[in-house]
Amino acid sequence: MVKVAIESNVWRDDSGSVVSGFEDLGGEFDDVANDTATASTLEHENNDTIILLIGQTGTGKTTFIYNATGNPNAKIGEELESETSEISQYDLFVDGHRVILVDTPGFDDTEIPDADIFRNLAEWLAKSYQEGKLIAGIIYFQRITDNRLSKTAKRNIFTFKDICGEGFMENVMLLSTLWARDGAEKMKQMKREERYKDNQDYWKSMIDQGAKTDRYRLYDPHEFGDAQRRAHEIISKILENQPQTTRIQQEMVDDEKKPHETTAGLHLVSEIDKLQEKFEVLIQDLEDKANRSEKDREQYKRELDDLQRQAREAKVQSQKLHGTYKATVMAAIGAVVVSAAAVAAAALSS
Ligand SMILES: Nc1nc2c(ncn2[C@@H]2O[C@H](COP(=O)(O)OP(=O)(O)OP(=O)(O)O)[C@@H](O)[C@H]2O)c(=O)[nH]1
Ligand SMILES: [Mg+2]
């Protein structure tokens, strides 16, 4: 057995507050840590089973990987902001199969979609398909503690559906996390789970197309057994799948589309376009109000600044989505260089 250092991890209650360390985990894992590695450089073998973990930030993706592998490189978030910032891979053996768990940065819970996260994921998927590696399963992580299905959460689900496509749904596992151990809280969460399953915008359409559901919590000796065994059970179910291509892989590799031209990308483009229009209208409205008097200007200044910041952010995300962000920065740098050269030339000629 390998003792894994777990003191640095935190455990949060439903409100997201840290309530204690992970000491109730027992701190012991089977001897899998020796076999594990993380790296974008991880070499794949032909019959590896590839499983992607996708979901909003803080839904427990990295926790699951840490529990499954015991690999201390799987860094669990201690703050409320996103922890995982790039796609990383971890290997382990389950039922005699080499499994590659792919940890992805969580979609943010912000109004403006994060283009980098989407593009990186799209490009990673396209590359793995080009290399002939198919995905056996995608686990979509969802906190069961989320009371309200926020607009952002719904948008992230839409994007996820677009990425997978109907044909991939049988390989999707909708995994609810952060379950309460028992009692009234758990009853409440079970009702919430039913609502997720019945809601067309949420899980229902995916379940109808073959997606499976399961529950996961870090540790519950009464119902779920220990965290590692449960994680392996979930992985075992995915091992039964026939690896498939996702829609976005077909679109990007077979149809040679860019990320922003795919179904998921087009929806995000239109989402950002709508947001930009909304910000424009709001800014115009506030500017009108602010221009009425000095006092009004003071009153609306902060709100206006905030809206202008959001409008700039939406523009950046739009450029990132289209892959033109760098070009714009370079063009700006280019313009400075040209004007500096013009000044130097003018100085020389005078
Ligand atoms: N109470 C409770 N907390 C959990 C559970 N699983 C994870 N957490 C906590 O939730 C927080 C986020 O977990 P992570 O595993 O880092 O989440 P993530 O999905 O990888 O987040 P990003 O990397 O930001 O996308 C951490 O503080 C975990 O300790 C659980 O079952 N119960
Ligand atoms: Mg993470």
Image (cartoon, rainbow, N blue to C red):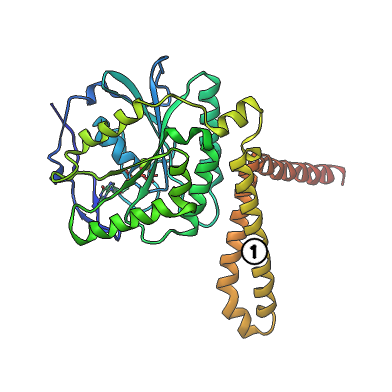
Please say if 47 is above or below 165: above
Q: Position of residue 329 (x, y in %)?
A: 66, 43
**For residue 109, side relative to residue 98 (left or right):** right
Residue at image coords 87%, 47% = 350
Q: Position of residue 65 (x, y in %)?
A: 30, 35
> How far from the left and from the top, in percent, is residue 122?
54, 35
Give neighbour class at mark 1: few <14, some 14-19, many 20+ (Cα, 10 Å).
few
Q: Position of residue 185 (x, y in %)?
A: 23, 60
Residue at 58% of width from left, 61% of height from top?
309
> Which residue ends up furthest to the right in the rendered image?
349
Residue 191: image quadrant is bottom left
**Residue carrying label 1:** 278
Residue 303, quarter of the rendered image: bottom right
Residue type beneath disc 1: Lys
Q: Nearer the viewer, residue 6 or 52?
A: 52
Give the quadrant of residue 216: top left
SS assignment at label 1? helix
Task: Decide if residue 72 is in sight here.
Answer: no
Residue in front for this viewpoint, 327 or 116 = 116
In-front residue for pair 336/224: 224
Residue 268 shows in the view: yes
Is 245 in front, or is 273? 245
Q: Is residue 29 left or right of residue 150?
A: left
